[in-house]
Structure formats: structure tokens, C-alpha cells
Image (tube, rainbow, N blue to C red):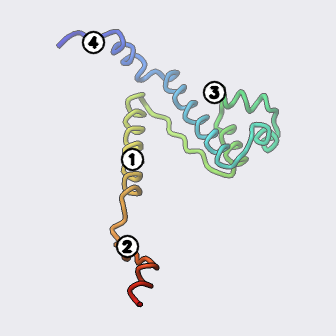
Amino acid sequence: MSEPGLLDKWFEEWDQDPDFILEGVLLAATERICELMDKHDVSRAELARRLGKSRAYVTRVLNGQPNMTLKTLTQIAVALGEGIDLFVPSSVREERARAQAAHEVQQRKAAQRAKPSRRRKPPVTHPTRKAAASR
């Protein structure tokens, strides 16, 4: 086997680096907040009003503010009326495996929804043919 490349070495170093993992957690949290804002049609200004904070504060939070606290996340969840799940992995590999499993579940659900129905459709009768047959 060949010696691992530079990228492999970096990945090994970052795999359990708390600061690197934190960036992924912050990204996931801000993505979820943005999804909920879109879902509930809440603008940054409206979220700021609900939180009793400035629009600049909401912008900092959505830009991945490194000091986002559990208190801030809780306040945002209450303001949006929906929970925000938070998963803090012990390694990047753990998060990647979890994300891959979740993606596969979503793909299976989408494939099942896309399957055609097995119900048979009733035969279509054309009104003009019906009228001609009854004459």
C-alpha cells in the first residue's frame, strides 16, 4: 500500500478537531434556521422583531456566528414555532456516516412515492362511439 497523501493526512487531523466539527454543527444549525424561515415565510427583519433583536444580529447568526449559544438556538426555535435538532458528532466521519444514512432514507422514501399506482384505470368510453353504437 502507498503512503497516505497530504489530503488524507489533513483529513485524519481534522477528523476529531473540535473547531472543525463546530463549523459543521454551526453550518447545519444555520441551514435549518434558513429552511424554517423559508417554510414559515419569515424574513430576517421579522425574525429580528420576534426575537427583540436587531436585523444585524440575525444576519450575524445566519452567517455562522461562532458564539451561537444553545440559548440563541432555543430563542430562534420558539420565534419560528418549530424545533431545531442539533447533533454534535465526536468526529467528522461520524457526521458523514449519519448524513449518508439520512440521505439514503430520503432517497428510498422519494422512490416509493414515485412508484406508479397498481390500481387499474377503468376503460375510457368515448361519447361519440357510445352514441353511434346505440343508433
Residue 10: name its quadrant.
top left
Separation of marks 2 and 1 at Cα, in angstroms: 28 Å
Q: Amino acid at mark 4?
A: Pro
Split into 4 quadrants, where in the image is the C terminus? bottom left
* Most foreground residue, 74 or 54: 54
Image coordinates of residue 50 in percent, x first then y, are 79, 44
Mark 3–mark 4 CB contact (< 8 Å): no
Mark number, residue 64: 3
Q: Which residue is mark 4?
A: 4
Q: Which residue is mark 1?
A: 107
Camera-nearest label, 1 or 3:
1
Sequence-wise, the earlier of marks 2 and 1 is: 1
Image coordinates of residue 19 in percent, x first then y, are 52, 21
Separation of marks 1 and 3 at Cα, in angstroms: 28 Å
Query: Dot 1: what SS?
Result: helix
Separation of marks 2 and 3 at Cα, in angstroms: 52 Å
Residue 122: name its quadrant.
bottom left
Sequence-wise, the earlier of marks 4 and 2 is: 4
Q: Amino acid at mark 1?
A: Gln
Split into 4 quadrants, where in the image is the N terminus? top left
* Most foreground residue, 4 or 130: 130
* Most foreground residue, 113 or 48: 113
Image coordinates of residue 26 in percent, x first then y, are 58, 30
Image coordinates of residue 24 in percent, x first then y, are 51, 28
Mark 2 Cα-neighbour bin, 10 Å: few <14, some 14–19, many ≥20: few
